[in-house]
Image (tube, grey):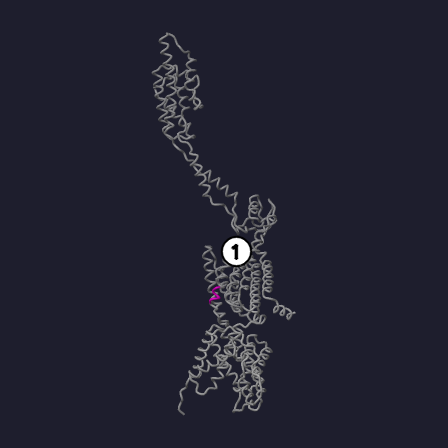
Amino acid sequence: MFGAMKKVFNTLKFDAFLLFLVGLSTLLLYTFMFSSVKNETYEVEEFKISQHTIRATKTVEDTVKTEQERQRAAQEVSAVYHFSEEVAKNRQAIATSIFDSLLEVKNENAARNKESGKPVFTQKEQIAEIRKKLASLKEEEPDLNLNDNTISNLLALDTEDMAKTQDKLVSVIGTTLSKPIRTADLASAQYEVERQLRLSDSIPPSVLQTVITLARSLVVETETINETLTEARIEQAKAAVEPTRILQGQVLVREGQLIDGEIYRQLELTGLLTNQSSLKPLLGLGLFVLFVSSLIYLHFSTWVENAKVKKKALLIVLTVFYLLVILMKLIALIEKDFDVLVAFLFPTALASMLIKLLTNERLALMMTFITAATAGIMLQEGYAALIQMEIALYILFSGIVSLYLLGNSGRRSSILRTSVGVACSNTLFIAFYLLMTQSTYDLPELVFYLIAAISSGILSGALTIGLMPFFESAFGILSDMKLIELSNPNHPLLKKVLTETPGTYHHSVMVANLADAACESIGANGLLARVGSYYHDIGKTVRPGYFIENQHAGQNPHDHLPPEKSRDIIIAHAEDGAKMLEKHKMPAEIIDIARQHHGTSLLKYFLVKAQTDGEEVKEEEYRYKGPKPQTKEIAIISIADSVEAAVRSMKEPTPQKIAALVKAIINDRLNDGQFNECDLSMKELRKVEKVICETLNGIFHNRIEYPE
């Protein structure tokens, strides 16, 4: 079954492979996150006992309470009054008009009476005449107390008393209405007018009550409500009222509490009733999952790399991500039973470090952001409005810190050092979180958060070290950690080289030094080149005596062999080494180095020997089977291999001789087309040449001749 899956893996085109895995990933992620955003609803009835303690899952405005508060604020607004000085003048003018009309009719009647000797108008006619004159006034002032009895009593006064009465009435009205009088003050103002009139001796007693009645009807408000300004104040007061909100996490009803009408209304408002399930969060989650999947798809579809490498990286990324998603799910299940944020125990930098060590930093950075956002949703406390922002930032910052601290080294010491740095970063972030919440925490809570911060960082490193071998084995990955393990001299194959072919072992160590330095100078993987060099000639252990570095006392078996036989033995060591490494389940990169480090180069010595013997030979028969170096590291190892052997055979090597030899070997390989299938540029070749020369000069420097 595994073999069939591997075959499908290798034959399926990357675009189809990417689309299938991203699509499957989308469904899986949605399934895992579904319960984190699904609205929790309750089946409750009004005026029944609640079986649960129910909290609000979101912050909503309580519109009913808000409106009640606004109405209360409006009622507390004092009306804006406007005092009018014209009111007193107007009321005095009315009083004056009444008495003027009375005097006018009275004087007119007196004048005609004098001429004829008898009254011209009866009292009834006089009253009618006065009413006619005051008709317009009565229409404007319907509340004015000016009945026939009042007019009749006032007409009974003589002209002098009427004038005095008028003056006193106008004066009292003017004095009283010169002060602010509101509707509530009318009775008091009318009483004051009556009091002043009763104290006056200018008004005949016969008409005192009539005048008082008239005066009381003339008293009106001098201060009236300014409707425009009052309404503006009311609106301002309403606007100043903060909306009443039901806050996320707020307890709406406790277990065993009666659900009254108000509580039921709040449950309905926050959408916690069974008949109020909303599809909005589920649609939102769908968009989030699509966004994450699209980001992963975009990254891999635009990544310029070998399809096999991209397939492997995609599988690694998704495997790491879903391991963490499962961990988030487990934390979310237990978190509700604690009063502290258990999510702070999450290994924040695990995704960042694992993916960087197994793939590359760019991919690790993208997955750090995705992991942080996913954790923010999945590790909600149950009533966060959208995302548990402190958890998302916690993971994001820790992941970025780990990427900087880890560097390009995959050694255990580097991972552990990085985990300590992450623990410090976590501690600082949690301190920031605790201070920003402005809440009071007791000592056990503070101790928990400190332990959580440190544990998260250490767990990140420990799990990275623990999981690396599984990923390396499952995906055939050659990490720095694995390379360091393979460089151990106690490795069985290296021991075999050392014990059976000590000359080859020494040669391999020298090649490793040269290749490592050269690779580092152009940004290639120096550690891979070093470790690959240790194993590149492992095939020589099959026939050790046929290789010059393992020959002693000047005995060379090739002196007694035909050139074609010698050719086959020498050429075979590359393929023999590759097969031996395959048998020991060595990484593909190391096997490729053993198989490709000679490329399709020519065995000139044995070709010339065959031609000297008079044989008709083809040049292709004396070339290695290849393939040519496919990577920069293998190309550099091939150069270092040839250069080290050539320089070692030189007599009295000098820097000038070494430089000329290195240049000649590189140019020979270049002209032979050995670098055509790797992406090694001419600029990089010049750097490689320079570094190899410097390294060789350090190895083969002149030594002081000590006296015997």
Given residues 254 and 492, the one toward you in this image is 492
Crowdedness near tag 1: few (<14), some (14–19) or many (≥20) residues, C-alpha within 10 Å:
some
One can see residue 649 in this view: yes
Image coordinates for residue 247, horizontal then vertical, percent: 51, 50
Given residues 47 and 632, the one toward you in this image is 632
Which residue matches tag 1?
387
Image coordinates for residue 44, horizontal then vertical, percent: 60, 48
Residue lying at 44% horizontally and 18% vertically, measured from the top left: 147
Of the residues shown, which amino acid type is indicated by label 1? Ile
Among all residues in the image, which is located at the extreme top?
117
Magenta part of the chain: 400-404
Residue 243 on the magenta segment? no
Residue 410 in the figure: left or right of residue 134: right
Magenta stretch: dominant secondary structure: helix
Image coordinates for residue 684, horizontal then vertical, percent: 47, 74
One can see residue 487 in this view: no
Image coordinates for residue 373, horizontal then vertical, percent: 52, 59
Instruction: Note whether 128 is above or below 47 in the view shown.
Output: above
Given residues 511 and 706, the one toward you in this image is 511
Residue lying at 55% horizontally and 51% vertically, measured from the top left: 57
Total residue callouts:
1
